[in-house]
Image (cartoon, rainbow, N blue to C red):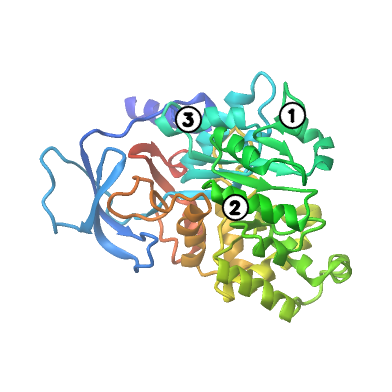
Amino acid sequence: MVRTRLLVLGALLLATPLSAQSWCAPQKADTGFVALTGVTLWDGTGAPERGGTTILLHGQRIAGVFKDGAERFPAGTRVRTYSGKFIIPGLIDTHVHVGSDVSGEDARPRAKRRLCRALLGGITSVRDMAGDTRALASLKRDAKVGDITSPDLYFAALFAGPAFFSDPRTAQASAGEVPGSMPGMRAIDSATDLRQAVAEARGTGATAIKLYAALTPSLVTAATAEAHRQGMLVWAHAAMAQVSPLEMAEAGVDVMSHGSLFAREMGSEAYAVLLKDSTGPLQGTFDTPAFGSLFAAMRRLGTIMEPTLFIYDGERGALRPIAGELTRQAHGFGIPIAAGTDSLGSGDEGAWAPPNLHEELRLLVRYGGLSPADALIAATRTAAQTIGALGERGTIETGKLADLVLLDADPLRDIANTTTVRLVVKRGAFYPGGRTLAR
């Protein structure tokens, strides 16, 4: 009878919306040593997957990675054995907009629920691509110190031409101030003191400047140079109305987003024709000197491509094969690919579902020609580069932050297995994975 009641209680818990459960209660890293043994490890460094491995954690850090039984554990080490399970680095979604919907009474609780669901899906860091930097700075602080259950946040301060700030989204992200006047949401033109503007953007806690719209090639180049001089990264779409992908790359932008926009390198007329009829075979369409020059420049400069294949759905579905073929060609040129969704997850209520990054990984394999290992790199090692955090995360190595995902099945055998999240470790704190919450 007792066992039956427990089973019924368990079923009710799994059917209860995630936000009503205790899964999102913040956890803290163990101050002592914890050993995860018996796992098969893919560490993201380029080393082959290896079984029978121990990962030793101490607080928020990885204290050692070695073959099971090869080293003696420090006194008092707690041992957790996961035979038959697989461990990968914490995943990073390199394109989210948590900070673009922060107005309203329920805004912060809603954002916290979305972030919690992402973490339980294996995402331990996100790159927020512009929003209200005041709200983002608060969430970033709380996530970092463990006051909320959330991936760590790295966000951008947005720079755009004055014409852009008639967009109603800018009023929402600048609530209480004049759109275009804020350090995190700034209108710039040829008269702007870029040194001061970038310094103020740094003061928001932003990792990067996002160059967005209504800018000229010369202003993109000048803003990028000043941001780099002050130690900030630069993120941008692959093209703007007046700026081609090659001009964007040659300006020194660190990460270029949205795969379909790379097709703008073919010129406006040819691009319009392509968009009008994109149903035919695309193989060879981008095998031209123009794209050869673009990808050669990106490879030389170390520019990262972030295709966001996930967003090409519904009315934009015809763009997915275009973005996929350009991803395939860029990858063949040796351009580093980063995994981002432009849509963190499906809502913040109801039964748990995997965050959208898992689908992006599948699409990178299906449309972009990446192997499962390449797709994992796009969401770990290369993703860490997009946020300037490779020294801290993106691979499983001694001394790095303990950001780990424990899977029930091998993602190298089938990339869809990244959804089998059994356990998530973020900064050494343990959380149940979505696999334990799904019905």
Residue 173 position within the rendered picture, expressed as x and y whole percent measured from the top left? 70, 31
Of the residues shown, which amino acid type is indicated by label 3? Arg
The mark lying in front, picked from 3 and 2, is 3
C-alpha distance separating marks 3 and 1: 22 Å
Q: Which of 96 and 168 is in front in this view?
A: 168
SS at mark 1?
helix
For mark 1, what is the residue?
A: 172
Q: Counting residues from the N terminus, which is met first, the one under dot 3 or under dot 2?
A: 3
The residue under label 3 is 141
Q: Residues within 10 Å of mark 2 (few under 14, many from 20)?
A: many
Q: Earlier in the sequence, mark 2 or mark 1?
A: 1
**Quick check: 154 above or below 407?**
above
Residue 341 horizontal side relative to residue 399, left or right: right
- Residue type of the residue flagged with mark 1: Gln
Residue at x 62% of width, y 75% of height: 296
| Percent of width and height locating residue 31 | 24, 33
Q: Element under label 2?
A: loop
Question: Which residue was labeled with disc 2?
Answer: 340
Question: How far apart, in angstroms, are the residues tagged by discs 3 and 2?
Answer: 22 Å
Q: In which quarter of the image is residue 41?
A: bottom left
Return the x and y of residue 358 as percentages of the image width and height. 55, 53
Residue at (31%, 55%) from the top-left corner? 397
Mark closer to the chain start, 3 or 1: 3
Query: Taking the image as drawn, is residue 159 in sight?
Result: yes
